Amino acid sequence: MITAALYFMQEKLLFFPTVLEQNYEFQFNHNFEELNFETDDGAKLSAIHFKVENPKGVILYFHGNAGDLSRWGTVAEFFVEKQYDVLVMDYRTYGKSTGKLSEAVFYSDAQLFYNYLKKHYDENDIIIYGRSLGTGIATYVASKNNPEQLILETPYHSISDVGKSRFPILPVAQLLKYKFPTYQFIEKVDCPITIFHGTNDLVVPYNSAKKLYEVAPKPSTTFITIKGGNHNDLINFEDYHTQLDKLFS
């Protein structure tokens, strides 16, 4: 019964979207444009594009597995304050975004927004940033394109690797429809990569990120250990800010 529940309920175990009405009005502290794209299969994708005067570049931000842009837009404003434009999208079923979920559309939808940025920015001005769930998507996009750099906050080797840590006696790899094999994508990334992970992460084990680092290209990949850091609090640590300031200088 547990095995069957894991298979049939896995989307509810992996994804925790909140839904916004289509007429919801976003409110943030920085100037932004709301974007709405329609995909070939009829899905509607919602995004926020923050813009500053004389930006150093643009950050394409892929968020975690819970919430919607009303929350993640506020998180992304942290990077706007560093004098970067920021584009953050909501995945299908999140916020105002609609359409049927699958692993394939996570990737194709993400590429759609990267293509949008290439029309407005030089590719060497694009930074891809992934957080938690978004790290697998970010790494995929980086592997297919030529951004200036890739930054991963609390990444995983693969979703099945995380699943094994939670359900060690179950055949997780065979049950999961969503693989997110970040370890396969990262091998094909040509730009500099920076990984941030906390030693006390109870959602994505620290060892999963270390396994990812082991297969990442060297010497272009840097692993930053945040001692005592958990899954959602790296921003509270001085080491995180110090290293980010170096990346964004």
Image (cartoon, helix red, strand yellow):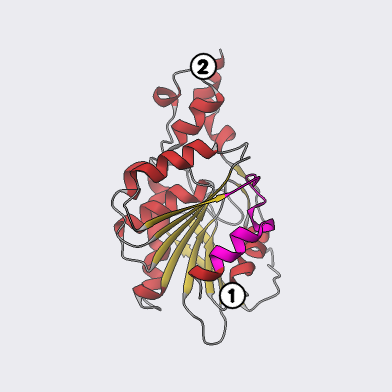
Rendered view: 14 above or below 90: above
Instruction: Say which residue appears at 53% left-offset and 30% top-offset.
Output: 10
Mark 2 or mark 1, which is nearer the start of the sequence? 2
Query: Where residue 149 sits: x, y (%)?
Result: 40, 65
Rendered view: 47 above or below 195: below
Q: Quadrant of residue 189?
A: bottom left
Q: Quadrant of residue 238?
A: bottom right
Query: Residue at label 1?
Result: 82
Say which amino acid is labelled 2. Answer: Thr
Query: Where residue 193 sits: x, y (%)?
Result: 40, 58
Q: Is residue 172 visible?
A: yes
Query: Residue at label 2?
Result: 3
**Left or right: where 239 falls relative to 3:** right
Q: Is residue 48 visible?
A: no
Query: Where residue 52 sits: x, y (%)?
Result: 57, 82
Calculate the distance from the C-alpha at mark 1 to the C-alpha at mark 2. Answer: 46 Å
